[in-house]
Structures are given as C-alpha cells and as structure tokens.
Amino acid sequence: MNPQEELSIRMAHQSAIRSMQRVVAEQAPAHDPIQAAAAVQGLLEAGRVLVLTGAGVSTDSGIPDYRGPNGSLQRHRPMTYQEFKYRPEARHRYWARGFVGWRHMDSAQPNNIHRTLARWEDDGKISGIITQNVDGLHQQAGSRHVISVHGDLGIVRCLDCHASEERTALDARLEAANIGYLQQVDLDPTAVNPDGDVELPQYLVDKFVMVPCLNCGSYALKPDVVYFGENVPSERKRQIDLLEERSDSLLVLGSSLAVMSGYKILLNFVKRGLPVALITNGHVRGEQKATWRWREPLETALARLS
Ligand SMILES: [Zn+2]
C-alpha cells in the first residue's frame, strides 16, 4: 500500500470517529405529547409529508442502533470504503463476519412502525420515505416510494467492474464454498450490527473461503451501502431533491441526524419555511430549528396518530 492510500484510510477513520462522537450541542425542550400529536396529525391530514427514518424505526425488528449507547460503533472500529478498496485482509474479515451476521439481518421482519408508514402512503398522507436504514424493511412492509439514502445491504457490488449481484445469490455461493462453517459459530445476536456484521475469532476468519465477482473474477466485493469515507451517489441525491420538492412538511422518526445527509434534509425544510416535526427517544441534531419536538418511544407515539 502506498503512503497516499495509508493517508486516505487514516483520514476516513478520523472522520468516522468524529461523526460517531458528534454531540448534539444545541438542545431544546420537548413539546407536550398531546399538543405534538395534534400538530403531527394536522400535517398528515394536509398530506405530502416527507418521512425521514433512522435506526430507531428498526430496533423493534431486532436490528440494533449502532450509534446508540450499546451500539457496535462503541465497541469496534467502523469499516471504511478505503479499507474495502485497499485492504484485502480487512475485506476478507468483513465478509467472514458478514456471512455469519447476514442470517440475522435477513430474518428481521417489519414492525408496527414500518406497517403504519406503509398504510399512511396508501391513505395519501405522505409523499414518500427517505430512510437512513439499509435493512429494506420499509419495502418489505409494502411502502412503495422509499429512497434508501445509504443504500441496501441486499445488493453487492464489485469495486473493479461495478457489476452487482443480489446478496441472497452471493450468500448461496458463499454457503457452497463454506460447508459446515456456520455450525462452528456460536452467534450472539447482540453482537450483530446493521451491517449484518458480527464479532468472529481470528481462526474462523482465516478459515472462511471468499468467492469472486461472477463477471470479472475480482475479490473486491462490497455491499452496495454508503460507508464512511464514501459519498451518496449523485443520482440518489437528485431523487432526494425531487422528493423534497414534492413535499410540504418533514417528519423525522428515530434518527439523531448525526449524519450530514439526514441533517441537510432538515435544514432544507427549515430554509423553505416548511414545518418540521421530530419524533425520537433522544436528542436530534438541529432540534432547536424544528417546529415540533416530540420525545416518546416511537411505537407509543404512532399509536396516538391515525
Ligand atoms: Zn467484477
């Protein structure tokens, strides 16, 4: 690896760590839940609500919030795009762990929050969903207009020829190459993060057999997810802009907006003078700019709405 590649790996890590440690500097008091519920109900009745969802929406489906206090980002270093590209051994470790963790992710089911949002779309209340989650659960619940801003763990892409493959198809190839492997792993579900990633001892990482890209034979495969050190593709940004233009208010569910791509959407609505409502358990970046701050467990809050 050349010094420039070393430097780009180090810089991506520093930026990942800064993002993880970002504290919500400006905080504002929550509104009364009954008043907030009436206000959000009003927005839904008016229609064209854009819903922005984060990890808090999927925790009830058994997918841990990796930024939360017990999240995996607190336990191990996040994988970066630069490591996928330049460090074959880090990539191999990722796929060994991902092979084990994927079973857990793949079996996750949509919960009441996902189902409520799918119903709101059918009822014409919302213009669409932008999700920071990569679990595909909104689509599974029946939501049709979903933009996964950080991509989808269900798709794998080759870094050399850019060919893509369904994760389930890759998984079938990995299973054939690793017969008996999973039986040797004692999986702790709390060690699984949203990447479908799990802690594995080194001897099991070494034993794992990776399979190559079907198109070009490269082993440089990466989930089609935006990693630290990587940008949201410009075509997806354009789709987000279009959806924002077709929306009259913003409802943020279960996200602290620590990541810029989410925070920017809040800022855009504030700039346009449109209402912004937040329903979260904790604090949200930029919350002092929001019209409504509703702090309650999501499922309880959504049960107050129709
Ligand atoms: Zn390829």
Image (cartoon, helix red, strand yellow):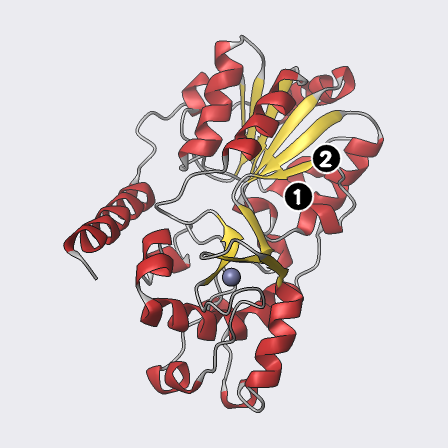
**Residue 246 appears at what percent x and percent y?**
68, 18
Q: Residues within 10 Å of mark 1 (few under 14, many from 20)?
A: some
Q: Nearer the viewer, residue 97 or 256?
A: 97
The quarter of the rendered structure image containing the N terminus is: bottom left
Per the image, label 2 sits on a secondary structure element best described as loop
Task: Estimate the x, y position of residue 234 in percent, counting from the top left.
Answer: 50, 32
Q: Amino acid at mark 2?
A: His
Picture quadrant where residue 163 is located: bottom right
Q: Quadrant of the C terminus?
A: top right
Is residue 150 something that shows in the picture?
A: yes
Viewer can see residue 78: no
Q: Which mark is residue 25?
A: none
Q: Residue furthest top?
A: 273
Residue tagged by mark 1? 299
Residue 132 is situated, as x and y percent measured from the top left of the image, at 54, 42
Residue 146, placed above or below residue 199: above
Q: State which mark lies toward you, 1 or 2.
A: 2
* Alpha carbons under labels 1 and 2: distance apart: 22 Å
Check disc 1 and give the amino acid type: Glu
* For the residues bearing labels 1 and 2, Cβ distance under 8 angstroms: no
Left or right of 218? Residue 143 is: right
